[in-house]
Amino acid sequence: MNVHANLSGGALLVLNSGSSSVKFSVFRVDPEGREITPLFAGQLTGIGTDARLSAKTAAREPIADESWAERDTGSVPVLLPHLISWIERHLPQDLPLMAAGHRVVHGGANLHRPARITDDVLAELETLIPLAPLHQPQNVAAIKVLAESRGDLPQVACFDTAFHHAQPLNSTTYAIPRHLTEAGIRRYGFHGLSYEYVARQLLATHPDLVRGRVVVAHLGNGSSLCAIKDGTSIDTTMGFSVLEGVPMGTRSGGIDPGILIYLMRKFDMDVNDLERLLYHQSGLLGVSGVSNDMRVLLGSSDPHCAEAVDLFCLRVAKEVCTLACSMGGIDALVFTAGIGEHSAEVRAGVCAHLNWLGIDLDAARNADAEALISSDTSLPVHVIATDEEFMIARHTVDLLTTHNAACRGSVARIRGSTCGPDGERRNPDRQRDIEPRR
Ligand SMILES: Nc1ncnc2c1ncn2[C@@H]1O[C@H](COP(=O)(O)OP(=O)(O)O)[C@@H](O)[C@H]1O
Ligand SMILES: CC(=O)OP(=O)(O)O
Ligand SMILES: [Mg+2]
């Protein structure tokens, strides 16, 4: 099957690197940088155990499902150059790779717009590794590998934290001594690219809602919720790190900080023990003792699995209320990401705690995962498929085209650009021209 048909302009690579997987998407960009069209996407999973490459075209036809175990040294930097050359081999000859956009989980206090990667930006990203030890090292590694193997490619970092940047002070501040807040110990929030995409979809389909008060529940491997009012993030459940908020696959979510002091004193746990406990051994896995995968838990007859699912649903429902409070009310609830988009059972479990709030699911609509899953008399509840990769592609093209237009007048000349980073000159008007993938 030919994935190269009818393509012109250049190609854009989007990378979302995690601890044991690298997700990628490749888009065609028209010469003006107005339209971006998905070509193919896939992931390298099981890195460190039994690496496997799978990929599909935008029409969901498989183009790869192969073991890369023989190349697997357990390291993203070793596998990434192989992945880049696989991707380049699958590009049409007249569609060269011309730029790369990365999901970078933490932008810290200073990086709150998509940023062209420079030595300074990279150095700043490295300082944030301790704040997101599960994600940031892989994000930085992917940028470095690409810079080494394809130094000519402009690279752009898009931050999970950026969408939350303008939150009110009360949402971002912990009740700790002021000098610590001033030293950056504050709430940043994550999954911002996903929330931004959902807000954008809402704007297209329900402009009335996006101007209202919407709680979006991004329930995936990592889970968080966000209060979006007037299209802007007002509050969110993740904070300084990706640990706060609801329980996740292997992360604890919020726990009494007194527990950490107790564990250090009583069980002699050190920082590495605590990191392992909170990031890798807790959450759905910790409570069930079986798995971090919601599908496994829902299919199990083990009562501990049911306990983990029930706990997850209650904690998500509680956060819906917390975030509604931050906005002075709620006009709609939206579910997104792996669990939110695909599990009718979890959506029903969450909403069962929210009947008193006027939320009432329509069982048939929920089972079919229709766009609107609530009853006609309920506060509206929607399912919206997220697309972080599209958002990264959009930001990357906007940054590089606007930037390049200012420098030299054409996206076709992005390659080899010597211009410096510029997050200020994005062109929001362009966004109207682009149709999202889903
Ligand atoms: N049909 C389903 N039912 C329940 N859970 C599902 C289903 N499909 C996927 N999931 C859950 O979604 C999670 C992955 O979510 P996703 O948003 O893809 O995560 P990430 O992008 O962070 O890796 C899986 O761990 C799995 O538990
Ligand atoms: C921020 C975060 O938790 O990301 P992910 O869901 O990809 O783990
Ligand atoms: Mg995710």
Image (spheres, rainbow, N blue to C red):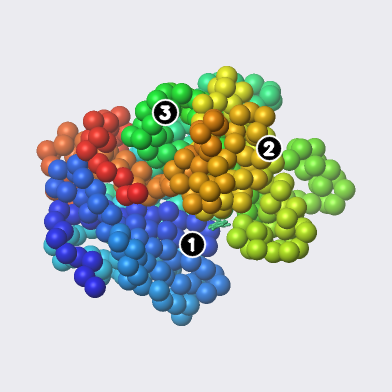
Q: Which mark is residue 239?
A: none
Q: Nearer the viewer, mark 1 or mark 2?
A: 2
Quadrant for the N terminus in the image = bottom left
N-term-proximal mark, 1 vs 3: 1
> Which quadrant of the figure has residue 284?
bottom right
Instruction: Report helix, strand or loop for mark 3.
Output: helix
Residues at circles 2 and 3 in contact by the CB criterion of under 8 Å: no
**Place of residue 416 in the rendered image (x, y in percent of width and height, measured from the top left):** 19, 50
Instruction: Report helix, strand or loop for mark 1.
Output: loop
**Place of residue 424 in the rendered image (x, y in percent of width and height, measured from the top left):** 30, 29
Q: Which mark is residue 353?
A: 2
Seen at 63% across and 54% down, the residue is: 249
**Place of residue 379 in the rendered image (x, y in percent of width and height, measured from the top left):** 54, 30
Tell me the amino acid under the disc marked 3: Val
Crowding at mark 2 (Cα within 10 Å: few <14, some 14-19, many 20+): some
Left or right of 17 on screen, residue 320: right
Q: Nearer the viewer, mark 1 or mark 3?
A: 3
N-term-proximal mark, 1 vs 2: 1
Please name the residue that numbered disc 1 is placed on. Answer: 21
Ligand 1 contact, mark 1 (Cβ < 8 Å): yes
Seen at 40% across and 48% down, the residue is: 387
Depicted 48 relative to depicted 327: above or below: below
Tell me the amino acid under the disc marked 2: His
Q: Can residue 316 be spotted in the picture?
A: no
Which residue ends up furthest to the bottom in the rendered image?
70
